[in-house]
Image: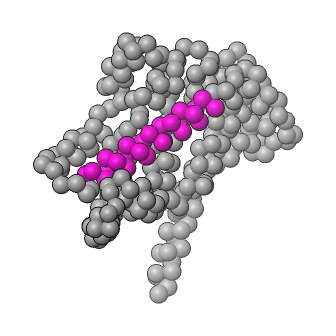
Amino acid sequence: MMKKYLSGGLFYLLKLLIAVVIICPVLYAISASFMTNSALASWPPNLIPPKVVFTNYQMALRSVPLFKFLINSLIVCAIVITAQVITASCTAYAFSFFEFKGRNILFMVVLATMMIPQDATIIANFLTISQLKLTDTYVALVLPYLTGAMGIFLMRQFYLTVPKELKEAATIDGCGDLRFLLNILMPISIPSIASLCIYVFIQTYNQFLWPLLVTNTMDKRTVQVGMQMLHNSEAAEYGIVLAGAVMVLIPSIVVFIIGQKYLIKGMTAGAVKG
């Protein structure tokens, strides 16, 4: 019994050490964003600001319109999340409840697209967007990401755990496929949908290369491009860059904190069938 408690204590201690290693850089970035340049350059380094100042945040907002870029990123994330939830749910429903020839092969083809690196398709996507004259628009930012194989896989794995008898009973009661999906299936798949939303949000919010390619003006720039602009600006200093990074990091932290329990449930929902 003592050996069991000892191994459990060591396991939790290891997890605590890993958590400290991961969170310490974030905490130091937040602390350093409130320091003056002299406090940042002092030795030994200050872990807590000797004097809390907000100059870095003011300079970051003056150098680059981060709030505008943040709004653009949130708009893009909202569009992509909504589209992926709809397309993933409908496609996963077809793969789970419809019987048609070549269903498994087609699903494997969909999964195979996950192995294609984005760098291999970005030039072709950019040429397509340019020929359609959609550059510097929200359409250009969201069009290649309106659906994804990861979302389809995640939703299908959950739908496979739903008893077929539920679908048969709904059909007998006169419930069509669309009504069954919207009124029965999607409400009970909230954990998987929330997990998909968090995954897509983080993936879309952190995009840099694609928004940089398809946007030309400040009106459509996203927040990651704004951070690079802040880093390259004449007023760039460690405190200012860290202040910008903290402001950019807040939405991701908030989304993760709110949806972390759904993220775990959604990722494990299809682990056991039946």
**Residue 50 painted magenta:** no
Q: Quadrant of residue 132?
A: top left
> Which one is in front, 30 or 199?
199
Is residue 242 among the parts visible in the rendering? no
Q: Residue furthest bottom?
A: 1
Return the x and y of residue 38 as percentages of the image width and height. Answer: 81, 30
Q: Where's residue 198, x and y in %?
A: 50, 48
What is the quadrant of residue 234 in the picture? top right
At x 41% / y 45%, what residue is drawn? 86
Q: Is residue 15 above or below residue 204?
A: below
Q: From the viewer's perspective, is 218 left or right of 135?
A: right
| For residue 100, side relative to residue 173 (left or right) | left
The residue lying furthest to the right in this view is 51
Task: Give the residue drawn at x 51%, y 70%.
Answer: 10
- Magenta stretch in the rendered image: 70-95
Against 271, residue 250 (above or below) is above
Question: Chief secondary structure of the magenta span?
Answer: helix
Q: Is residue 71 left or right of residue 172?
A: right
Rendering quarter of residue 65 = top right
Q: Residue at x 36, y 30 (%)?
A: 118
- What's the residue at 80%, 28% (across, down)? 58
Q: Is residue 94 visible?
A: yes
Q: Is residue 78 magenta?
A: yes
Residue 156: give x, y in percent of width and height.
Answer: 32, 54
Q: Nearer the viewer, residue 227 or 163?
A: 163
Above/below status of 29 relative to 135: below
